[in-house]
Image (cartoon, grey):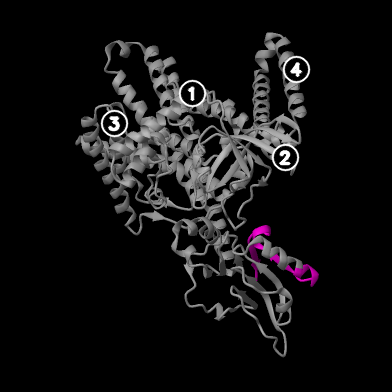
Amino acid sequence: MSKSYKIPLWKKAPFLRLLLPVIAGILAEYYSSFSLQFIIYLGIIAAIFFIIFLLLPIVYRFKFSFILGIIITVFVMVLGLFITWNRQVRNHPQWYGHNIDSSSFIVATLNESPVEKNKSFKAVANVQAITNGNTISNASGKVLLYFSKDSFSGNLKYGSKIIFSNKLQDIKNSSNPAAFDYKRYCAFQQIFQQAYLPHGDWVATGLSNISFYDKIKNNAQHYILSTLDKYINGFNEVGIAKALLVGYRVDLDKDLVQQYSNAGVIHIIVIAGLHLGLIYALLLWFLNRIPVLKKSAYIRLIIILICLWCFALLTGASPPVMRAVIMFSCIQIGRTISRNTSVYNSLAASAFILLCIDPFYLWDVGFQLSYLAVTGIVALHKSIFHWFYFKNKIFRAAWNIAAVSLAAQIFTMPACLYYFHQVPLLFMVTNIFAVPLATVALYGCVALVCVSSIPAIASLLGKVITATLWLLNHVVFLINAISFSTWTDFSISPADTLLLYIIIISFLYWLISRSRISLPIALCSMLFISILYFNKKLYAFHQKKIIVYDIPNHTAIDFINSNTYFYIGDSELTKDDVLKNFHLKPSRISFNCDNINKDTLAVFRKDNFFQFYNKRVVMIDTSVNYLPFGKKVDVDYIIISKNAKVRIPALTEVFNCGTYIFDASNPLWKIAKWKKDCEDLHLRFHSVPEQGAFVTDL
């Protein structure tokens, strides 16, 4: 009996053979920065080889068909090189940065409504022109603007055109260890500079010409948001409703968002694949019950595509939504054209299209997690679902949701560990309850908008949605209250992440196909990752560090000893979870510090004097005059904070100091004076706001 031939994945999903070289081209251009001339020459060479191959006799073309594959691969790589070069706005001659100086004025249009922050309004603006003296030149590019809070900035909105003097500065990171790379994040969106504009430094010139689509989108979003505000009660409930339906997250409480993240259901309030999937499923269910449309696949396809794209455009066409709508569009097109099409091919096709639109999606965490989750669901859902069989429909539906969650979590777990340093352990339980409730709430919100012109029905429906969202929030609160609900404070490197994926894929492939080579690969990878983990723990056991953090207007210092830390600084940073998680926690996780040093054996403290092993540290955070002793006191570091009224020459009469450290709680003008004194006296110094966090190893 002949064995059945199994078609390999790369033949069932030919778009994979296009996706991989375009990714290679994107990576090559980003990390090597090839010139446009080189890219064109490479494309011409590939074209010449392609023409030569076509001129060969058919016998040789058939015999050396693999050469055609190589040429096409090179072509696609050149495409990846070009789209990455072209996407970088600084390569374009009209980028504003090529024609600007300190005396320039900038004409820009806000491309979003300003978002209120603690001390300012924040908005991204598109640069339209640069004025240098009497010369006005067209320009392009995006800048990040912060407006002081006043009655004038409060009137700004999407489409407002303003003129402001050039106060642009390069976007900088906080420079704290393991901190979020905000500069690179903005660069991927082609934003490289920012400015703070108090009233008087900018002038509004009215509204720019807003496109017909933008007017419809803004009016539709305003109507939807006002409808939800009118009929849904409760601050948290209406905030979740807005996030569910249109992705509006401004009104969401930060602590609530963190709880959704900890519970493993953050995908519910980040409008993307889940929401488009629910809309897609609703459309399929509805259209399949209309006899005329059920028989006409192409009419059904057109209706589904129109509805999905309209929903995406009305929600603002954000990158996560566009990823999801392109993904489902490719899947539906593939199913309509051929019933035997591979879902992997549709996924590869959608990823290829998205990367051609914006190659920097490749570094977007949402992009990576979306495709990892969907790939996991496609690859594992059926196998996991068949582990158990339930006759009861409710139990079977609950197990189906759990199987989907588990399949997605298996493929996203290493990435979540790498990016977020945590994995929810009770995600299956949470999703069993949260997904049905979110589904009811989303469908209810859609229905509410449709019947909003009938107050009686809308009011009743609003109460049902409010109760559903209240229950959803309390399910999340209940799960978070369980001490072991989340595995946190886990740090892994890119190498660890890669090894984890090798282990998962190899082990799963061994379970499914019983491949002989897969299990040894998984076991060897487990050995390597164990060695890396042991080395990391060994290094952490011997580490001794002093870190002065770069946190604007705050003082924060960690004395790190092995896997413990002793904190000195503002209590606000320990009480505010958002500030702590953003500024302090990444550093402590990266250095494997999971315990507070409460016994202070490693750190001896007396008033503002600290002894940490062989290092002596003095903290000066008040206006104090030190009287000279008979002999100068030797100290390694003097940390000056809180705008203390001290003079460097006076301190030198009391201390022999190795390095003066000015932390981020001091104003820059005061630091400038201290720096000048240090330079005149030939003293070493470190300005945290300007040079970044101070980190030293003992």
**Going from the N terminus, do you reach mark 3 or mark 4 first?**
4
Mark nearer the N terminus (4 vs 1): 4
**Residue 389, can we see it?**
no
From the viewer's perspective, tell me whether residue 217 is left or right of residue 103: left
Of all residues, the one furthest to the left in this rendering is 392
Residue nearest the observer in this picture, 217 or 424? 217
Residue at which label 2 appears: 104
> Which residue is tagged 1?
213
Of the residues under marks 2 and 1, which one precedes in the sequence? Answer: 2
Q: Is residue 210 magenta?
A: no
Instruction: Please identify, in this view, whether the residue under mark 2 or under mark 1 is nearer the observer.
Output: 2
Position of residue 199 measured from the top left corner of the image (x, y, whole percent)? 58, 46
On the rendered image, what quadrant is the N terminus found in?
Answer: top left
Label 3: which secondary element = helix
Q: CA distance from mark 2 to mark 3?
A: 50 Å
Residue numbers of the magenta segment: 677-698
Instruction: Give the foreground label among 3 and 4.
Output: 3
Question: What separation in Å lies between label 4 and label 2 (alpha carbons)?
Answer: 47 Å
Q: Residues within 10 Å of mark 4 (few under 14, many from 20)?
A: few
**Circle 4 or circle 1, nearest the eye:** 1
Disc number lying in front (2 or 3): 2
Secondary structure beneath disc 4? Answer: helix
Image location (x, y in percent) of residue 7: 48, 24
Badge 3 is on which residue? 448
Marks 3/4: CA distance? 60 Å
> How far is disc 3 from disc 1 in space, using C-alphas?
23 Å
Q: At numbered mark 2, what does the secondary structure look like: helix, strand or loop?
A: loop
Asked whether disc 4 touches disc 2, contact meaning CB atoms under 8 Å apart, the reply is no
Q: What's the amino acid at mark 2?
A: Ser
